[in-house]
Image (spheres, rainbow, N blue to C red):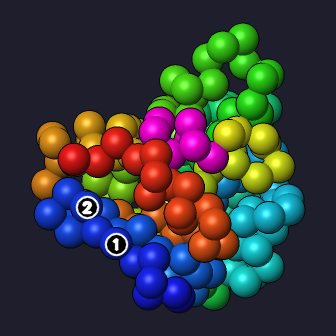
Amino acid sequence: MNSQYEQTFVDERVVISVGDITLEKVDAIVNAANSSLLGGAGVDGAIHRVGGPAIIEACRKIRRTTHPHGLPTGEAVITTAGELPARHVIHTVGPIFGQHQGQERELLAACYQNCLLLAAQNSLTTIAFPAISTGAYGYPPDEASEVSSAAIAKFLVEDSTLQQIRLVFFRSQDAETFLHHHKFA
């Protein structure tokens, strides 16, 4: 982790850092998944590789039972974290920029809100997020920073369960973009 970029907001309940999300020792890490839940590239691929077969088995069970057609954009589900240092993985499907008839902001906000709600419902106190949709899904990082920080801030006003929300950026450039565009007070 590059401590130069570790900054806190909202009474230190939100931490911005640069690092590898698969190394985070938290109750849950968020997977920026595709709707199949069966692995992919980027963060999704890394989480499945490091977490091992237990994650894919849990995702296959979700596909057989509650989401046979795949996880809809903006929704979230929770599984084991397998071999990861986290206890759980919360999978969410971010919007592909330009593919949702102008609903991208609402769908991205829903990703964060639904992950946080699922964490709180499962009595989790720490969670780590990647920058959802800003990679292969093409969401502009500056706008994603505004949307994600506003969604998190809104959630924290009403929630006391979550003690720490970590926003883990893979590159320092992405953390810098976030720090220039966030909406935290």
Q: Residue at x 44, y 87 (%)?
A: 3
Q: Which residue is denoted by mark 2 in the rendering?
A: 9
Residue 138 lies, in percent from the top left, at 78, 41
Image quadrant where residue 84 sits: bottom right
Disc 2 marks a residue whose amino acid type is Phe
Q: Residue 112, can we see it?
A: no
Residue 60 lies, in percent from the top left, at 76, 56
Q: What's the magenta region?
A: 141-147
Task: Determine whether, in the image, residue 78 is placed left or right of residue 91.
Answer: left
Q: Residue at x 53, y 63 (%)?
A: 176
Task: Determine whether, in the image, residue 90 is placed left or right of residue 41.
Answer: left
Q: Which residue is denoted by mark 1 in the rendering?
A: 7
Res 80 label:
none
Disc 1 marks a residue whose amino acid type is Gln
Magenta: main secondary structure equals helix
Task: Determine whether, in the image, residue 87 is placed left or right of residue 9.
Answer: right
Q: Residue at x 73, y 83 (%)?
A: 50
Local packing at callout 2 (Cα closer than 10 Å; few below 14, some 14-19, many 20+) is few
Task: Determine whether, in the image, residue 137 is placed left or right of residue 71.
Answer: right
Residue 167 lies, in percent from the top left, at 46, 64
Tell whether label 1 touches label 2 (CB within 8 Å): yes
Q: Residue at x 34, y 72 (%)?
A: 7
Q: Is residue 177 above or below residue 110?
A: below
